[in-house]
Image (tube, grey):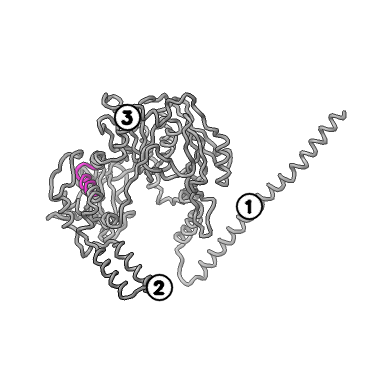
Amino acid sequence: MGKTLRNLALAALAIGLAAPAAITGQSKKQSDDAAVIRNLDIFNSIYKELNTFYVDTLDAKQTITTAINSMLDNIDPYTEYIPAEDQDDFMVISTGEYGGIGSYIMTRHDSTGVCISEPYEGSPAAKAGLKPGDRIVAIDGDTATKWKDGQVSKRLKGQANTQLKLTVVRPYVSDSVKTFTITREKIKVNPVPYYGVTHGNLGYINITTYNEHTAEQVKAAVEALQHNPAVKCLVLDLRGNGGGLVDEAVKMIGFFVPKGTEVLQTKGRNTLNFKSYKTTEDPIAPTMPLVVMVDGGSASASEITAGALQDLDRAVVVGSRSFGKGLVQQTRQLPFDGMLKVTVAKYYIPSGRLIQEIDYSHRNADGEAQRIPDSLTTVYHTAHGREVRDGGGITPDIKVTYPELNRLVYNIVRDNWAFDFATKYAAEHASIAPAAEFAVTDTIFNEFKRFIDPKRFNYDKVCEQGLSQLKKVAEAEGYMTDSTKAEFAKLEKLLKHNLDHDLDNNRKSISQLLSGEILKRYYYQRGVIENSLNTDEALDKTEAMISKPGEYEHLLNLDAKTKTKAKAPAKRAAGKKRNGK
């Protein structure tokens, strides 16, 4: 009897202790709900007052959309409102399919309207004869010279097997006005524009996005390359790949690791957002040496692929540090056919690390989200005990430093000088050398230099600007004596910019731009990629690594006697606490 009474007393004490916590939790939720209702009421009242008394008529749709976007911008850049009229573009990214003519378009900065940027190979646009540089002036008889690219895109898209009439002005030809009748088709965006053998024994696969066709296209490429006896190593090029569908990344990883391997976990605010991703099929290339190439443009699903294969010690990662996006989005339907793409979870790769670089839950006094400094990142371990870190993308095993473009080269791209020159070159040359052999010769480069009009070519002359600023400082601080002025005069002569000299000084970067623009007019994106492999430092380093006996195994610690597994639960908890979730 005494024991029963003691148990009842302990139970009552436990209930008494739990009750305040429950009441506190319930009270906080009620307080939060009340705050939401109160603030929505304030917002509603403000809009009603503006709509009634503001001096000019308000555009209701624009005003409310601005308010929505401002709210979402303060959360993270991936949570966004997608109204019904913008959902076609969102679905194209996910499915890789749409009805249209199959071409990139762009709005020119020189106010000459929208032009064809690059038709897809084999698309209705390409088959009809549209070329890069064609300026769109009318669609189905409607003048389009003042339209933006969004409006043009909507008119070019439509149901497969429907027709449109497109009128363009083609530069650098005598018969410049051309009209095409084009039948729209179901366009499938090819996520693998090129694969082949390069550098003697590397089976190279270029992957540009993760849509519904990515895994099947990569699988076909892997199987084809495996049947080539020359291939000793597979290379997945994810540079510039901004990601897409997570499931496609998991399928792709499954081509190289055992069936049932956990490659990803997602964790949100509640248990509903927890999910474990495991491979579901037997691998097709379980042992062939594997390299994954990344750079600062590799994000999301690309980082899942590279990070999981690195953590599992299945691939050597080559390149520069990836973007650092470890957040998962989900779409939610809204009234009036709207859609909300909302961040619901963070993802963790096999070692347990989170690679998110920016902590959007903590901002400075200016409201800017904070990057996680390298000094605060945590060490994790791969399957074979190698050290890797969280908090800042995927750090390659073999690093490649890519040169930064200076202002001169940037302006050549921004103001379409390379694009327009390539359009002119293609109009004057019916054919060029095969894609793999083409090179920008002295003749081509000198033609480009003559093509640039110095009166219209503007670029930031950093030396001259810096010298001008230094003169102002010297005058303000009282150092501008006669002797100082004389020295400044000498410097001005020495640092005077010469366009011809600057173009020659940047010939390597400019030649790469020109080569890409010219090649796409003859061989489309496939040719551009094939040609670029000739001067790819990351592939050069990959070839050197594969050629050195034992180097691949050494980098992945494959000869380790004891395979150390990461202490995932403890590390995950630490990462979770640091990110305030």
The kind of secondary structure element at disc 2 is loop
Q: Which mark is first along the chain, 2 or 3? A: 2
The kind of secondary structure element at disc 1 is helix
- Residue 191 point in image, percent of width and height: 33, 38
- Residue 112 point in image, percent of width and height: 25, 60
Q: Where, quadrant-wise, is the N terminus in this rendering?
A: top right
Where is 335 relative to 110, above or below? above
Indicate yes or no whether the magenta region holds residue 517: yes
Residue density around tag 3, few if under 14, some if 14–19, many if 20 or more, within 10 Å: few
What residue sits right under mark 1 in the picture? 33
Residue 422 showing in the rendered view: yes
Q: Where, quadrant-wise, is the C terminus in this rendering?
A: top right
Determine which of the numbered discs, if any, sits on residue 548 in the image. Answer: 3
Q: Measure the alpha-carbon separation of dots 2 and 1.
A: 59 Å
The kind of secondary structure element at disc 3 is loop
Q: Nearer the viewer, residue 193 or 396?
A: 396
The magenta-colored residue range is: 513-524
What residue sits right under mark 2 in the picture? 477
> Which amino acid type corresponds to the residue marked 1 in the rendered image?
Asp
Q: Measure the alpha-carbon separation of dots 3 and 2.
A: 60 Å
> Which amino acid type corresponds to the residue marked 2 in the rendered image?
Glu
Q: Which of marks 1 and 3 is in front?
A: 3
Residue density around tag 2, few if under 14, some if 14–19, many if 20 or more, within 10 Å: few
Q: Which mark is first along the chain, 1 or 2? A: 1
Residue 393 falls in which quadrant of the image?
top left
Q: Magenta region, mostly helix, strand or loop?
A: helix
Residue density around tag 1, few if under 14, some if 14–19, many if 20 or more, within 10 Å: few
Q: Nearer the viewer, mark 3 or mark 2?
A: 2
- Residue 341 point in image, percent of width and height: 47, 47
